[in-house]
């Protein structure tokens, strides 16, 4: 059966319609996480720098780098600093898929807290005020660290709407460290 799938992929010949082949195609993220391709290698090199490379650097890779960065952010064999820079780099990739990937990272409760928190900051950088609604929803997340990161990401956006969101959440928050992050966000959001 697997051989028939390879034959179809290789374009060598037809497979009988009576016996369809059902194979699960690997996703770009799973391929880039396991295959040491040149794009992954180059991205890792950039991520090993002490700061995230500028937007122009990531732009030249195009949307193909999005699943590579997403896979690197989740790869526990990659040093933590590089993983977090991979999330931040997604904010600098000029592709709608980058914003969608950041939002998926932020909203997935099964992802590591550090990845979700970094995604909150990166989503704010990428979408600006368009991120307020998405970030606001995460102020009620069960993850304390994420709530802190979201409060700070919102504060960096600033503006009256952000102030209202943070002020609305402040009396509802019971955890002192998150309340402090909300206060810091309000300070950052000062007009």
Image (cartoon, rainbow, N blue to C red):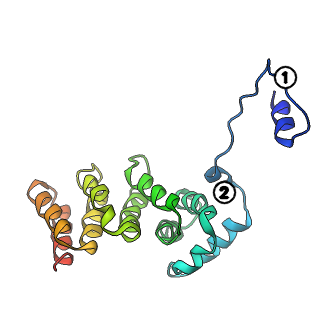
What residue is shown with label 1?
A: 16
Of 45 and 39, which appears nearest the observer?
Answer: 39
Residue 65 as seen in the image, left or right of residue 144: right
Find residue 152 and report its image quarter: bottom left
Residue 120 in the image: x percent, y percent? Answer: 36, 62
x 15%, y 68%: residue:
163
The answer to whether any part of residue 178 appears in the image is yes
The answer to whether any part of residue 112 appears in the image is no
Alpha-carbon distance for marks 2 and 1?
32 Å
Residue 189 in the image: x percent, y percent? Answer: 19, 75
| Farthest-out residue, left | 171
Q: Earlier in the sequence, mark 2 or mark 1?
A: 1
Other-residue count near label 2 (Cα within 10 Å), few / some / many at <14 / 14–19 / ≥20: many
Of 11 and 184, which appears nearest the observer?
Answer: 11
What residue is shown with label 2?
A: 32
Residue 147 in the image: x percent, y percent? Answer: 26, 58
Q: Are marks 2 and 1 in contact (CB under 8 Å)?
A: no
Under tag 2, what secondary structure?
A: helix
x 21%, y 68%: residue:
181
Quadrant of the drawing holding the N terminus: top right
Residue 21 in the image: x percent, y percent? Answer: 76, 27
- Name the mark on residue 117: none
Under tag 1, what secondary structure?
A: loop
Other-residue count near label 1 (Cα within 10 Å), few / some / many at <14 / 14–19 / ≥20: few
């Amino acid at each position: 059966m697997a051989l028939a799938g390879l034959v179809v992929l290789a374009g060598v010949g037809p497979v009988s319609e009576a016996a369809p082949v059902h194979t699960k195609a690997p996703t770009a993220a799973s391929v880039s996480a396991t295959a040491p391709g040149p794009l992954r290698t180059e991205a890792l090199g950039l991520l090993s720098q002490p700061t995230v490379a500028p937007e122009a650097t990531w732009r030249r890779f195009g949307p193909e780098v999005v699943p590579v960065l997403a896979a690197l952010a989740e790869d526990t064999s990659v040093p933590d600093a590089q993983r977090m820079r991979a999330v931040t780099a997604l904010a600098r990739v000029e592709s709608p898929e980058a914003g969608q990937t950041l939002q998926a990272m932020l909203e997935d409760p099964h992802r590591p807290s550090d990845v979700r928190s970094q995604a909150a900051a990166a989503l704010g950088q990428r979408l600006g005020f368009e991120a307020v609604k998405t970030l606001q929803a995460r102020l009620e997340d069960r993850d304390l660290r994420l709530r802190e990161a979201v409060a700070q990401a919102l504060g960096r956006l600033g503006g009256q709407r952000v102030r209202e969101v943070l002020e609305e959440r402040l009396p509802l928050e019971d955890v002192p460290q998150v309340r402090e992050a909300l206060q810091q966000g309000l300070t950052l959001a000062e007009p």
